[in-house]
Amino acid sequence: EVQLQQSGAELVRPGTSVKLSCKVSGDTITAYYMHFVKQRPGQGLEWIGRIDPEDDSTKYAEKFKNKATLTADTSSNTAYLKLSSLTSEDTATYFCTTGDNNYFDYWGQGVMVTVSS
Amino acid sequence: DIQMTQSPASLSASLGETVSIECLASEGISNDLAWYQQKSGKSPQLLIYAASRLQDGVPSRFSGSGSGTRYSLKISGMQPEDEADYFCQQSYKYPYTFGAGTKLELK
């Protein structure tokens, strides 16, 4: 069974960057598109983007194009989300997710990012 | 972007009651629609995909229907463990988009 293990909670300063990881086990990462989703406290789900680890091609939601960068390392079966120029608006839980046929069967546990001085 | 308008925003149901949640897409999405359940403090869980297909392991009281721009999730017989937030999501076109969510509570 595919499992996604995300890195731990982050407390970061405004204006800085943070890089979150999502390690895939139970299958090779190149079998899937890896997606990332944002959820602000008490709010809904926002799709950030996805990466195809096979060729590193990416798609982003327009509002995240200057905020998020997706990368993947096939040797470690890990996908990454880098968030830059952090503000309080970036305080949220970030999930990695993937699955078959563009549906999200598998989810990481989520990582809480808190932006505060 | 395709907008997903989900209703109602919140819902309260009695044990055994049948409930429905609707999602309206701003354009046709060719049944490329999923429903997720998210319990408090947990990751979302896939319930329904391709508008009407039940994910393995999901109780049969959950069902999905719809076509074109209108889709719905039905829970036939509310159970205590169904208390959660529910989201629809289209995967027809990038960027993928979610509905705003429905909070379902047990009355």
Image: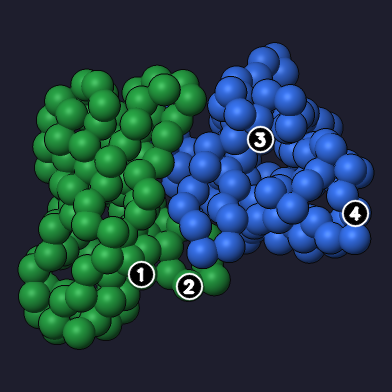
Chain colours: A blue, B green
User: Residue B15 shows which numbered tag?
Assistant: none
Q: Nearer the viewer, mark 4 or mark 3?
A: 4
The kind of residue on which mark 4 rests is Arg
Residues at discs 1 and 2 in contact (Cβ within 8 Å): yes
- Where's residue A88, x and y in %? 74, 53
Q: For the point 88% across and 56% down, which residue is it?
A: A12
The kind of residue on which mark 3 rests is Thr
The residue that disc 2 covers is B40
Q: What is the crowding at mark 1: few (fewer than 14 residues within 10 Å), some, or many (at least 20)? A: some
The residue that disc 4 covers is A13
CA–CA distance in space, label 1 to label 2: 7 Å
CA–CA distance in space, label 3 to label 2: 30 Å
| In the rendered image, the vertical position of residue A83 relative to residue B46, given as above or below | above
Q: Nearer the viewer, mark 4 or mark 2?
A: 4
Location of the C terminus of chain A by quadrant is bottom right
Choose the circle earlier in sequence order: 4 or 3.
Answer: 4
Residues at discs 3 and 1 in contact (Cβ within 8 Å): no
Q: Nearer the viewer, mark 3 or mark 2?
A: 2
The residue that disc 1 covers is B84
Element at badge 3?
loop
